[in-house]
């Protein structure tokens, strides 16, 4: 069958997902307590400091979205994450793709 449809999502809805909120919180804490350059290489160092459940979630997120979560739109030392710079469409596309693959098995 064909896999297409339309989903309307409000801005910032990802914070309503408990697992994503926990991931953001852990990354903010890691960034606050460490000194990381805004480079692709730093992403793996940050990922190793996550708890196992959030690390598993972070691992399935597309690499460029991982970068946006870690370094995009947030000033150093800030406890706020600017969700407008995170590609939530790519994030949800990845989650939907995983679910469709699971259902095909």
Image: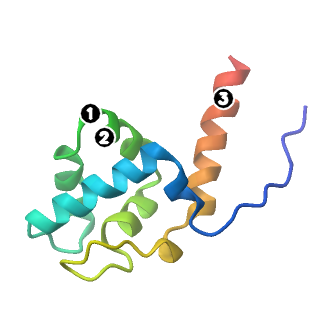
Discs 3, 2 touching: Cβ within 8 Å:
no
Q: Is residue 6 above or below residue 80?
A: above
| Residue 101 marker | 3
Find residue 9 and report its horizontal and vertical position in percent: 71, 61
Find residue 39 and report its horizontal and vertical position in percent: 24, 71
Discs 1, 2 touching: Cβ within 8 Å:
yes
Alpha-carbon distance for marks 3 and 1? 23 Å
| Residue 64 marker | none
**Mark 3 Cα-neighbour bin, 10 Å: few <14, some 14–19, many ≥20:** few
Classify mark 2: helix, strand or loop: helix
Q: Is residue 25 above or below residue 11?
A: above
Alpha-carbon distance for marks 3 and 2? 21 Å
The residue carrying mark 2 is 55
Classify mark 3: helix, strand or loop: helix
The residue carrying mark 1 is 52
Classify mark 1: helix, strand or loop: helix
Quick one: quadrant of the C terminus? top right
- Which residue is drawn at the image coordinates 38% and 64% (left, top)? 69
- Which residue is drawn at the image coordinates 61% and 51% (left, top)? 92
- Which residue is drawn at the image coordinates 40% and 69% (left, top)? 68
Give the image quarter of residue 12.
Answer: bottom right
Quick one: quadrant of the N terminus? top right
Q: Is residue 2 above or below residue 34?
A: above
**Which of 23/89 is in front?**
23
Of the image marks 3 and 2, the number of the one nearer the N terminus: 2
- Which residue is drawn at the image coordinates 62% and 69% (left, top)? 11
**Mark 1 Cα-neighbour bin, 10 Å: few <14, some 14–19, many ≥20:** few
């Amino acid at each position: 069958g064909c896999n297409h449809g339309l989903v309307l999502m409000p801005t910032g809805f990802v914070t309503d997902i408990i697992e994503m909120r926990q991931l953001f919180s852990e990354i903010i804490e890691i960034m606050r307590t460490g000194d990381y350059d805004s480079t692709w290489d730093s992403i793996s160092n940050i990922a190793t400091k996550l708890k196992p459940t959030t690390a598993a979630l972070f691992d399935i997120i597309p690499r460029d979205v991982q970068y946006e979560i870690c370094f995009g739109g947030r000033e150093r030392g800030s406890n706020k994450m600017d969700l407008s710079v995170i590609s939530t469409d790519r994030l949800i596309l990845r989650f939907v793709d995983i679910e469709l693959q699971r259902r095909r098995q």
